[in-house]
Amino acid sequence: MNIDNQLIVIHTPKNNKYLAVVDLKKEFTTNEGKFKFSQIKNIPSQVKTSTGINFKIYKPSYKEFVLLMKRGPQIIYPKDVAQIVLESNIHNSSKILEIGSGSGALTLYLYTLLKNTGKLYSLDSSKKNQRRADKTISRYISTLSEESNDINFLNEELVNFNYKLLNEDIDSIITDVPEPWEFFKNNKIKNSIYWVSYLPSMTQIMRMNNILMDNQFQDIEIKEVILRDWVVDEKIVRPSNKLVSHTGFLITARYIEY
Ligand SMILES: C[S@@+](CC[C@H](N)C(=O)[O-])C[C@H]1O[C@@H](n2cnc3c(N)ncnc32)[C@H](O)[C@@H]1O
């Protein structure tokens, strides 16, 4: 197995996890010990450190990858990604427009869901963020055995975006930008779609709610995902004291062209 340049998680006995790319010429150092990448013969496997303890080596899951990866803009947390996918009714041949590529955390998950019958457009005004997102996504995709089709990055300000030019009936629009209502300055939706906006504050949600109502969207719902982990072992069964507090609100809606 050629493991050079492969993306791995290094999982230590103290339950610390590190994301790394194998470089057979280098070693990996933590405060629990170090090892040479050349000691890794397979993925998954275990390696013994210089201090004699075992580190587990395996491929990252999506969740591990996005939580451990280097980021630019704030990502959408996996708990919210899961709800967004449900609310935007995504299936493997969906045609999706994502507004706000950012660090590519949501883009990557959407990509993994689509087969080559689906299509993914991702718009951002920042070329720098899109380049970084593209690089991050390619790094993770290389760990997958199956590839979907391409991500179509659109580099422009939302306010200048002409939805008609996509020439495609989009099924779901998902936004993670501070002012998603700018979409409606120059565009009118004329095909049936699901709309999901992720917004950190309730004042933004209120404004978006008004815009969706003005544009004849139906089934408008506002929600927040609160996820609580539990600790379970022989003597203890209690909620974890590590709680991700507020991340963002979701406003979800549907437009149906009757
Ligand atoms: C918070 S980040 C998105 C993070 C992304 N959802 C993720 O999970 O990694 C927001 C992105 O929206 C972009 N953005 C903000 N306002 C915009 C606008 N008016 N038009 C286009 N892009 C915009 C920013 O450049 C930034 O990259």
Image: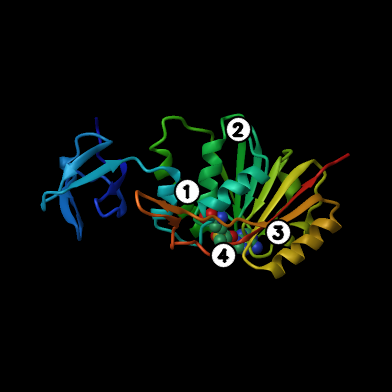
Q: Nearer the viewer, mark 4 or mark 2?
A: 4
Say few, some or many: other residues with alpha carbon within 10 Å of mark 3 (under 14 / 14 to 19 / 20 or more).
few
Say few, some or many: other residues with alpha carbon within 10 Å of mark 1 (under 14 / 14 to 19 / 20 or more).
some
First of labels 2, 1 by sequence position? 2
Name which residue type carries label 2: Asn
Task: Look at mark 3 in the image and give the residue it sits on.
Answer: 160
Residue visible at 65% across and 50% down in the picture: 174
Q: Which mark is residue 134?
A: 1
Question: Where's residue 232, x and y in %?
Answer: 40, 50
First of labels 4, 1 by sequence position? 1
C-beta proximity under 8 Å, tags 4 and 1: no
| C-alpha distance separating marks 3 and 4 | 31 Å
Secondary-structure class at tag 1: helix
Q: Nearer the viewer, mark 1 or mark 3?
A: 1
First of labels 1, 3 by sequence position? 1
| C-alpha distance separating marks 2 and 1 | 21 Å
**Residue 224 in view (yes/no):** yes
| C-alpha distance separating marks 4 and 2 | 30 Å
Say few, some or many: other residues with alpha carbon within 10 Å of mark 2 (under 14 / 14 to 19 / 20 or more).
some
Q: Nearer the viewer, residue 242 or 203?
A: 242
Q: Quadrant of residue 169?
A: top right
Name which residue type carries label 1: Asp
- Outermost residue to the bottom: 203
First of labels 4, 2 by sequence position? 2
Secondary-structure class at tag 2: loop
